[in-house]
Image: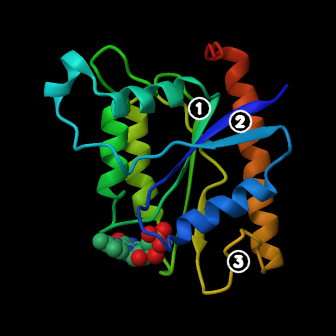
Amino acid sequence: TRYKVGYFVGSLATASINRTLSKALIRLAPPDLEFVEIPIKDLPLYSYDYDADYPAAGRALKDAIAAVDAVLFVTPEYNRSLPGGLKNAIDWASRPWGDNSFAHKPSAAIGASPGTIRTALAQQSLRGVLSYCNSPQMSAPEGYIQFKPGLITDAGEVTDAGTERFLRKFMEEFRAFIIRELAVLPRPET
Ligand code: FNR
């Protein structure tokens, strides 16, 4: 069996360290995990005015989440919370009312920051949002990566053995979490 993971990169920056982190995570993940990015950058700002007639971008987002077994958030921290663009994407996916894409969708979060708090508060905010959205979340291990220049190459190769071990372990745990959740939740129809 292969498991599909849709990943969100919470940063829209071209030189995003979290995008670099996502490449490392994909490289180090168990081979039966398949990854597809769920893009967020072209979504308009959400309003419930859209609910009656969801635009193509909103539909595509919801279809992408429906097509995967689990979602992974790789996100920076902005002003001690999750970036607005990522929150906007979650708002889109949670609606229209009664059609919340995150309900029963297993998830995990990880993030990188140059700072020593290492996205802990962003992830705490994200956890609250995902709890409300009824997404079962991997509670441990937590993934707080302090990013120093050169820690991960542009191609996603980790240059520090301890970090590499940790990221590999994180993805192994995420795989086990997905399998446990799928045992009690129906798989998405694709
Ligand atoms: C930041 N940064 C930041 N870092 C952090 O650890 N805690 C924070 O609250 C913030 N706040 C914040 C706000 C805004 C608006 C910006 C642009 C940046 C710094 C941030 O961690 C750094 O820019 C990372 O490089 C962002 O990750 P990406 O975009 O490179 O993936």
Query: Quarter of the image holding residue 24?
Result: bottom right
Label 2 CA crowd tier, 10 Å (few <14, some 14–19, many 20+): many
Looking at the rendered structure, the kind of residue marked 1 is Pro
List the residue tagged with mark 2. Answer: 177
Q: Name the N-terminal-most of marks 3 and 2.
A: 3
List the residue tagged with mark 3. Answer: 153
Residue 54 x, y percent position in the rendering: 27, 23
Q: Describe residue 151's horizontal placement relative to residue 136 as left or right.
A: right
How far is disc 3 from disc 1 in space, using C-alphas? 29 Å
- Name the element at disc 2: helix
Looking at the rendered structure, the kind of residue marked 2 is Phe
Residues marked 3 and 2 touching at CB (< 8 Å): no
| Residue that appears at 69% across and 33% down | 4
List the residue tagged with mark 1. Answer: 106
Residues marked 1 and 2 touching at CB (< 8 Å): yes
Residue 128 x, y percent position in the rendering: 38, 43
Q: Name the N-terminal-most of marks 3 and 1.
A: 1
